[in-house]
């Protein structure tokens, strides 16, 4: 598997990837609750899904895993504020004297029966979010306005969006009428035992007691979320810290680099976080 | 001279002396024998000195003669100090100085050695030359105190700086010395000079004030000392300490000024069962953190829980005494049975209870015990009886830090390690230990030294019994932080009361003064006025200007009460243009940075309008699309231009400030809360001018449901005038916080706003509350929550910025997670307010 992946590095690949079918190719995902069953049920009924949760808690990983499990290709679009509907649906291009229509990622997913993941959907302009409406109800259609066409979605197509209900999205929340069209799955940072498993799996070289301390540190640090931390310490950040340790950085320094420096410029908050880190790691 | 000649000379001197004074002659003869053991020649010198000094000044002579014997014993010689004594002949009236000199000489030899003694004498004699009274004060000062433990260097470090102070500011050593010694003892020698300089200035301004300063009797003297207190200064780290406690215990504790000063003895963190009282400084950061965790541990692990306190009194077969007027309880009756030996028992009890609590803390805070033990091992053993207690405490710590192995002598402590042990177990075990203890008896004065760093007397203050109910979600043993953090229900907490800001620092076991409720210090956000009387029914009928009515949500009935809260629009009439100017000058650098940030944000934020039908540049992408579509046989719209006009992100914002009484409190960041709010609103307004979004400013306050005042400071369609700035400069607090009504009114105000996206920023320093809420916190919480919901339905996004550190307990329920921020650093408010807006509008 590794060798296969290595051959793919630095090579252009199509955004629609047929899923790897073997067991060894399974993305590692540790279920937190019943999200796998919920997702499968939604998929069975072709209902669109909305993943909610703070950054770095495993949403993307979950989806990669589900795509593998359901043996569907996955198309991911990271939304941003300049994303137009053409960027999703497609546009005409000039080729020599002729013009050709080029499908956007959403159109391609609709045709290929892939899972289309619109990451951080609230970042996109509202005019781009409305085009997903007909895809999310019983019609399952994508209008191609420019071409004066409509596509019935492939029967395996599925739409998934994510959003992180945080401080930055107060003004950008999705319209209630949009939200209602989705099955919602709430994510949060995993429970302690699960988070340990995740860290251990992502950083196999890290020894168990360090994993335990790291997870305990992260959980403690999360309690300071409302005290000036815009984003709480994520599982991703813990994985980073673990990797830094394995790369030979002192635990306290590794945690500082991965858990403190990136998230705050507030000196007292940083000191309080360091206090937590030192309590666990510096003896 | 030959031997017989010398002896004859001595006899002659003695005869002369006898002529002058019977007593002098007698005393000289008495001492002579001993002196003569040093040699007759020396004895002659000495007798001559006796006569000379006596002739100069009878008292000086007497002091010299009578003191000699002891000095000889201490020094083993005669000539050196005899010659020094003769120096005093230079001055009239020097007997006081000489008397002091002779009195201290033995100690000087003893402590400083003979070279040190010489220097000591030299320094003092020089002072006699400068100012005789200062010289006298110097020699009368016990050498131990002068030297502290540093020998002659200690004397020099204290006295040499005074020479400049004397020559430059005429500060007498006599005035300086006693205070300087105390200051050095308390704060170290570095603190002495700044203190004395300040004192010298004050002295020049007024004699009485200056003397009070040097006697450390004046406020200003004490304040100056506290300012210079070495070690870890708690007021400067208030927020850090709060964050640490919150992280470990999931609670916001009130950290109040313990009103400690160095002359009150050792600095301890104390608690009254409700708040933590911090001394202004603790010896080190580590000790401060340990002490804080320890004291909070007592609260979290139920040392002061009502049920257990009652059980304790039951244990000794007594009713617990009635609560005092302040609803506090004193422990004293528990110890009454021990009579004179009360302190010994108290210490043992504290040892047990501290061990229990520290074990529990360690389960929550990793390595807490290791750190506590490390601090204890690094400390020097106290002198006297305290040492035994200190050592025993260390021993128990070592034992638990090494996982409490089986050890016969430790087994009686073991039950305390049990998770389910309570203070009642600590009390029982203390009684058993006391029954056959060989710990020495203790005095109150020595007691403070018996505690390990981080620990402190547990019954130091009368306590407010805590209700375990408040902690129910913490479980009684098993750690469950998720509950603490995610507790989503609004907890009605009718017992929450105004907390006294300050308490007397003495030992209230022996003397319980009523706590003072005024005073400085304290924290932001506790100032919800207590209902004066709970009426407020139909008072509005008297008003002709009833204003505008809004419905209010009553959670008890699950319905709205129609036309319930009446809002009147009013003008703020206190103007202070100078204050506004002053604030803008003070914050000019911050404002400049903000404006620069806004500028750099602009191009990205205000992207040129794309896909326009008209414009100065081609929109390349649109143009390609246009051509392509045209070729494909369609008829696309020719919107292929970009306009250089900056696009306005279509956001309108109202900044609505809670201006209730509580903002007039002093803030931990210095100044009053209102000062920061003024600056914050000004900076916000100035930044908004730069940003260009439509905005309005308003404040609100309330008294009863029919009297909600809404003060519009600047409307959407108004400019930021000097008048508006002056209003902000003169902003002050009044009345209470009926937030729901104010929100509803502000939402109506958006009718006049031109924009699509509408943001209502609410700046607050505490919970919604009003005089007529009958103490039911939940009532206005629920109403505010509904008002927020209504606002969202009306297309307005409320967002709360709070200064209340406890905000995260109730704001998620009212505004929704992510729809508020807690600013725990009030100094940041001015800068943060515009920043938060810029983030939100992105
Ligand atoms: N349940 C989980 N199973 C396995 N790995 C996980 C899990 N949760 C988190 N991780 C780890 O955390 C990392 C971050 O997760 P992921 O990228 O899925 O977060 P996200 O929620 O998509 O974040 P964002 O909102 O920032 O995109 C993953 O790379 C993985 O290492
Ligand atoms: Mg204690």
Image (cartoon, coloured by chain):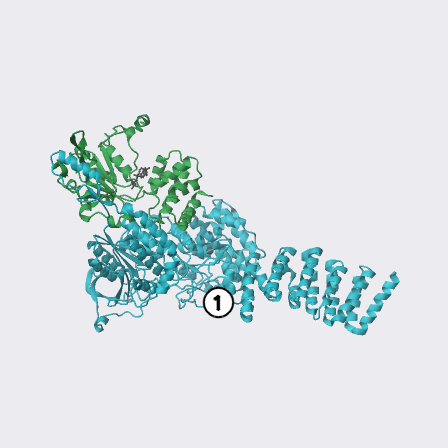
Chain colours: A green, B cyan
| Residue B686 falls left or right of residue B272 | left
| Residue B129 falls left or right of residue B581 | right
User: Label 1, on which residue?
Assistant: B511
Nearer to us in this view, B670 or A280: B670
Nearer to us in this view, A82 or B94: A82
* Chain to which the residue tagged by mark 1 belongs: B
Q: For residue B422, say whether it is visible.
A: no
Relative image position of residue B135 (x, y in whole percent): 66, 65
Give the tally of numbered discs: 1
Can you say whether B680 is above or below B643 in the image? below
Q: Residue at x 82, y 69 (%)?
A: B14
Relative image position of residue A171 (x, y in whole percent): 25, 50
Q: Quadrant of residue B730?
A: bottom left
Q: Residue at x 18, y 29 (%)?
A: A96
Nearer to us in this view, B387 or B23: B23
Relative image position of residue B663 (x, y in whole percent): 35, 63
């Amino acid at each position: 598997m590794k060798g296969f992946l290595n051959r793919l590095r630095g090579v252009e690949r199509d955004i629609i990837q047929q899923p790897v079918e073997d067991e060894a190719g399974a993305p590692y995902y540790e279920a937190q609750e019943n999200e796998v069953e919920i997702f499968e049920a939604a998929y069975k009924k072709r209902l669109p899904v909305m993943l909610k949760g703070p950054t770095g808690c495993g949403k993307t990983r979950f989806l990669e895993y589900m795509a593998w499990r359901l043996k569907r290709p996955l198309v991911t679009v990271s939304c941003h504020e300049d994303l137009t509907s053409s960027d999703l649906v497609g546009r005409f291009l000039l080729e020599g004297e002729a013009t050709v229509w080029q499908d956007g990622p959403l159109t391609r997913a609709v045709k290929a029966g892939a899972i289309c993941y619109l990451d951080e959907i609230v970042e996109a302009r509202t005019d781009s979010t409305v085009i997903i409406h007909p895809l999310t109800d019983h019609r399952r259609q994508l209008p191609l306005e420019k071409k004066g066409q409509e596509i019935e979605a492939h029967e395996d197509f599925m739409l998934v969006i994510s959003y992180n209900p945080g401080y930055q999205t107060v003004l950008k929340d999705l319209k209630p009428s949009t939200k209602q069209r989705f099955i919602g799955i709430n994510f949060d940072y995993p429970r302690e035992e699960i988070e340990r498993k995740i860290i251990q799996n992502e950083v196999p070289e890290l020894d168990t007691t360090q994993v335990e301390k790291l997870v305990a540190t992260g959980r403690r640090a999360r309690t300071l979320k409302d005290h000036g931390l815009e984003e709480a310490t994520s599982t991703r950040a813990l994985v980073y810290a673990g990797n830094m340790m394995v790369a030979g950085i002192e635990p306290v320094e590794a945690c500082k680099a991965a858990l403190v420096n990136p998230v705050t410029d507030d000196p007292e908050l940083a000191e309080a976080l360091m206090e937590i880190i030192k309590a666990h790691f510096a003896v | 001279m030959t031997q017989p000649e010398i002896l004859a000379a001595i006899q002659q001197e003695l005869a002369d002396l006898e002529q002058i004074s019977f007593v002098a002659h007698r005393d000289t003869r008495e001492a002579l024998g001993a002196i003569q053991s040093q040699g007759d020649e020396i004895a002659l010198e000495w007798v001559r000195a006796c006569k000379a000094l006596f002739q100069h000044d009878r008292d000086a002579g007497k002091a010299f003669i009578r003191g000699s014997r002891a000095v000889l014993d201490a020094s083993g010689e005669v000539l050196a100090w005899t010659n020094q004594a003769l120096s005093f002949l230079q001055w009239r009236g020097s007997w006081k100085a000489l008397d002091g000199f002779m009195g201290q000489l033995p100690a000087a030899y003893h402590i400083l050695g003979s070279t040190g003694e010489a220097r000591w004498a030299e320094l003092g004699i020089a002072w006699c030359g400068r100012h005789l009274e200062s010289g006298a004060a110097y020699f009368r000062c016990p050498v131990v105190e002068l030297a502290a433990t540093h020998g002659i260097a200690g004397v020099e470090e204290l006295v040499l700086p005074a020479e400049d102070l004397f020559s430059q500011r005429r500060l007498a050593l006599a005035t300086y010395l006693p205070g300087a010694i105390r200051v050095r003892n308390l704060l170290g020698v570095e603190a002495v000079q700044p203190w004395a300089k300040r004192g010298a200035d004050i002295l020049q301004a007024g004699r009485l004030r200056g003397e009070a300063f040097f006697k450390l009797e004046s406020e200003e003297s004490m304040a100056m000392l506290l300012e210079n207190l070495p070690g870890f200064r708690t007021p400067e780290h208030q927020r850090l300490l709060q964050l640490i406690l919150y992280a470990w215990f999931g609670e916001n504790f009130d950290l109040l000024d313990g009103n400690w000063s160095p002359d009150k003895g050792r600095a301890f963190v104390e608690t009254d069962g409700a708040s933590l009282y911090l001394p202004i400084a603790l010896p080190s950061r580590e000790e401060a953190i340990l002490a804080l965790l320890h004291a909070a541990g007592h609260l979290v692990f139920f040392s002061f829980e009502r049920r257990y306190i009652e059980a304790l009194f039951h244990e000794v077969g007594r009713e617990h005494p009635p609560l005092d007027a302040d609803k506090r309880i004193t422990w004293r009756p528990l110890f009454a049975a021990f009579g004179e030996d009360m302190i010994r028992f108290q210490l043992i009890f504290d040892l047990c209870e501290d061990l229990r609590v520290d074990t529990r803390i360690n389960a929550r805070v990793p390595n807490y015990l290791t750190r506590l033990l490390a601090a204890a091992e690094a400390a020097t053993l106290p002198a006297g009886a305290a040492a035994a207690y200190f050592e025993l405490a260390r021993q128990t710590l070592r034992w638990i830090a090494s996982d409490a192995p089986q050890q016969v002598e430790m087994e009686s402590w073991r039950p305390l390690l049990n998770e389910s042990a309570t203070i009642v177990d600590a009390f029982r075990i203390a009684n058993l230990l006391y029954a056959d203890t060989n710990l020495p008896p203790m005095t109150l004065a020595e007691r403070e030294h018996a505690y390990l760093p981080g620990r402190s007397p547990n019954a130091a203050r009368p306590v407010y019994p805590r209700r375990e109910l408040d902690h129910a979600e913490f479980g009684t043993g098993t750690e469950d932080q998720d509950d603490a953090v995610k507790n989503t229900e609004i907890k009605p907490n009718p017992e929450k009361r105004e907390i006294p800001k300050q308490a007397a620092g003495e030992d209230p076991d022996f003397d319980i003064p009523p706590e003072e409720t005024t005073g400085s210090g304290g924290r932001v956000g506790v100032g919800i006025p207590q209902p004066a009387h709970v009426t407020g029914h139909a008072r509005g009928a008297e008003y002709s200007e009833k204003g505008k009515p809004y419905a209010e949500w009553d959670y008890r009935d699950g319905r709205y009460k129609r036309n319930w809260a009446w809002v009147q629009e009013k003008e703020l009439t206190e103007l202070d243009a100078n204050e506004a100017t002053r604030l803008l000058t003070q914050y000019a650098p911050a404002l400049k940075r903000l404006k620069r940030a806004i500028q750099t944000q602009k191009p990205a934020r205000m992207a040129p309008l794309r896909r326009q039908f008209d414009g100065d540049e081609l929109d390349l992408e649109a143009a390609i699309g246009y051509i392509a579509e045209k070729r494909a046989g369609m008829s696309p719209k020719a919107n292929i231009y970009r306009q250089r006009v900056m696009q306005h992100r279509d956001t309108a914002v109202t900044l609505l400030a809670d201006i209730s009484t509580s903002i007039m409190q002093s803030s931990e960041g210095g100044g009053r809360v209102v000062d920061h709010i003024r600056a914050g609103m000004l900076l916000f307004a100035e930044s908004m001018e730069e940003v260009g979004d439509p905005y309005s400013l308003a404040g609100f306050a309330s008294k009863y449901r029919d009297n909600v005042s809404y003060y519009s400071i600047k409307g959407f369609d108004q400019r930021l005038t000097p008048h508006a700035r002056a209003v902000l400069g003169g902003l002050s607090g009044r009345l209470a916080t009926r937030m729901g009504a104010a929100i509803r009114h502000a939402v109506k105000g958006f009718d006049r706003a031109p924009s699509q996206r509408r943001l209502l920023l609410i700046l607050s320093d505490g919970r919604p509350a009003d005089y007529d809420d009958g103490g039911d916190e939940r009532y206005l919480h629920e109403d505010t929550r509904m008002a927020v919901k209504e606002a969202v339905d009306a297309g307005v996004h409320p967002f709360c910025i709070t200064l209340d550190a406890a905000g995260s307990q109730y704001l998620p329920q009212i505004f929704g997670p992510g729809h508020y921020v807690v600013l725990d650093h009030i100094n940041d408010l001015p800068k943060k307010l515009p920043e938060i807006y810029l983030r939100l509008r992105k």
